[in-house]
Amino acid sequence: MAYKTKIRKIGNSLGIVLPKEALLAMKVEEGATLYITEAPKGALLVTPEEEDFIDMMELAEKGMQKYRNALRELAK
């Protein structure tokens, strides 16, 4: 499902307000921690905090660093 929102000025920063439906789909409430990660083709992935998420991301980054040359070749 796609949700539409606009970038808004919040104080001296820019931000987005997530629609109620998006929050319900992610099962998050005010004060929840969200992670924003890069995805293919310039997209971003917004993920609610889950147990072991940081550990999984660190492991993935180590693997990508270790095998960066092989991954680069596979991406061609």
Image (spheres, rainbow, N blue to C red):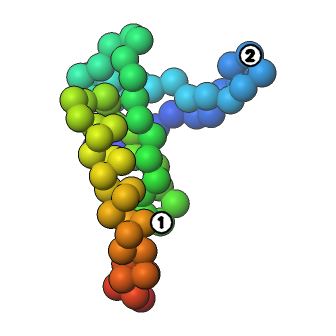
Residue 70 placement: quadrant: bottom left
Image coords of residue 10 (percent x, y): 68, 19
Dot 2 lies on which element? loop
Residue type at mark 1 is: Lys
Up/down of 61 relative to 48, above or below: below
How many angstroms separate mark 1 from mark 2 (CA)? 30 Å
Up/down of 53 relative to 14, above or below: below
Residue type at mark 2 is: Gly
Image coords of residue 43 (percent x, y): 47, 55
Up/down of 75 relative to 20, above or below: below
Image coords of residue 45 (percent x, y): 40, 46
Q: Which mark is residue 26?
A: none
Image coords of residue 69 (percent x, y): 43, 81
- Identify the residue shown where x is 42% and y is 66%: 65
Left or right: 32 in relation to 5: left
Give the labeled residue for mark 2: 11
- Asked whether disc 1 touches disc 2, contact meaning CB atoms under 8 Å apart, the reply is no
Q: Which residue of the protein is positioned furthest toward the top in this rendering?
A: 30
Total count of labels: 2
Give the labeled residue for mark 1: 41
| Quarter of the picture holding the C terminus | bottom left
Left or right: 6 in relation to 28: right
| Quarter of the picture holding the N terminus | top left
